Amino acid sequence: NIDQNGDVYLLADNVTTTKGVLRIPEDASQTLVASLLEHGRETAEMIVAIRADNPINFSQFSHADSDVKENKSFFKLDELIPYLNENMFNSVLYKILPL
């Protein structure tokens, strides 16, 4: 997941697909929750799925369910780009609108 600030979070890593179908989250009882980065202003986020024949080490990225308030830098778009250049990927852009 990439937010409009360039912060990168892992939703899942090295997931095996069934019949080419990727489900995030894998567990149907879980839900993805999106929030506005700034109160009252539209937010854009992108989910990127990278396809690779072998597992990829994504240890430099934090999982989306981790405590984002820790003293970590999540601005790692520059570290994600080489993976996109070296592998096939799909993406979807979505917008979160204020109510």
Image: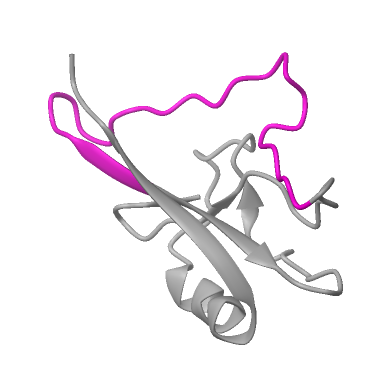
* Residue for point 76% across, 52% down: 20
Residue 16 place in picture, x, y as percent: 85, 52
* Residue for point 55% across, 77% down: 84
* Residue for point 52% across, 40% down: 68
* Residue for point 61% across, 78% down: 83
Query: Image quadrant of residue 89?
Result: bottom right
Is 25 in the magenta? yes
Q: Can see residue 20? A: yes
Residue 9 place in picture, x, y as percent: 55, 50
Magenta span of residues: 20-45
Question: In the figure, is residue 45 to the left or right of 30?
Answer: left
Residue 99 place in picture, x, y as percent: 18, 13
For residue 82, above or below residue 29: below
Magenta stretch: dominant SS? Answer: loop
Q: Nearer the viewer, residue 93 or 61?
A: 93
Is 98 in the magenta? no
Question: In the figure, is residue 12 to the left or right of 95?
Answer: right
Question: In the figure, is residue 35 to the left or right of 90?
Answer: left
For residue 26, above or below residue 98: below
